[in-house]
Image: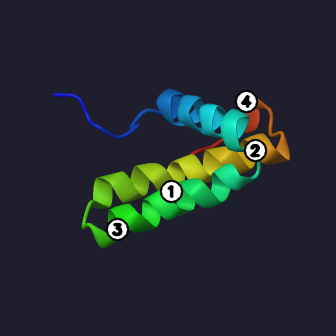
Amino acid sequence: MTSEYPTTTKNIYRLAKLMFDQHGDNAVFIAAKIAADMEKQGKIIGRDAWRKVVKAVIDYIDDVPPDDREIH
């Protein structure tokens, strides 16, 4: 069974990169809104995944090198 949410660090950063490329700095707000919507729907795994995407997008904005990234 596969998850409908990004669960691996690699997939989280892929999604964050895609969002950052498409939305720039606004990607943080979009990902945070999705996380909030997931929480309202009671989808805790989805909320947690999207919170990690928020952190990963911030890493892209801050230009954190891949070796220094930590997603917890």
- Crowding at label 3, few (<14), some or many (≥20) Cα neighbours within 10 Å? some
Asked which quadrant contains residue 8, the reply is top left
| Residue at x-position 57% and y-position 28% | 14
CA separation in Å, label 3 and label 1: 10 Å
CA separation in Å, label 4 and label 2: 18 Å
Residue 51 is tagged as: 1
- Crowding at label 4, few (<14), some or many (≥20) Cα neighbours within 10 Å? few
Q: Residue furthest right?
A: 63
| Residue at x-position 54% and y-position 34% | 15
Q: Is residue 9 left or right of residue 1?
A: right
Q: Secondary structure at mark 4?
A: helix
Q: Nearer the viewer, residue 11 or 31?
A: 31
Q: Which residue is mark 2?
A: 24
Q: Which residue is mark 4?
A: 66
Which tag is nearer the camera, tag 4 or tag 2?
Answer: 2
CA separation in Å, label 3 and label 2: 24 Å
Residue 72: where, in percent of width, then height?
A: 53, 51
Q: Secondary structure at mark 1?
A: helix
Residue 45: where, in percent of width, then height?
A: 31, 53
Residue 13: where, in percent of width, then height?
A: 58, 34
Q: Which residue is mark 3?
A: 39
Colour option used: rainbow
CA separation in Å, label 4 and label 3: 29 Å
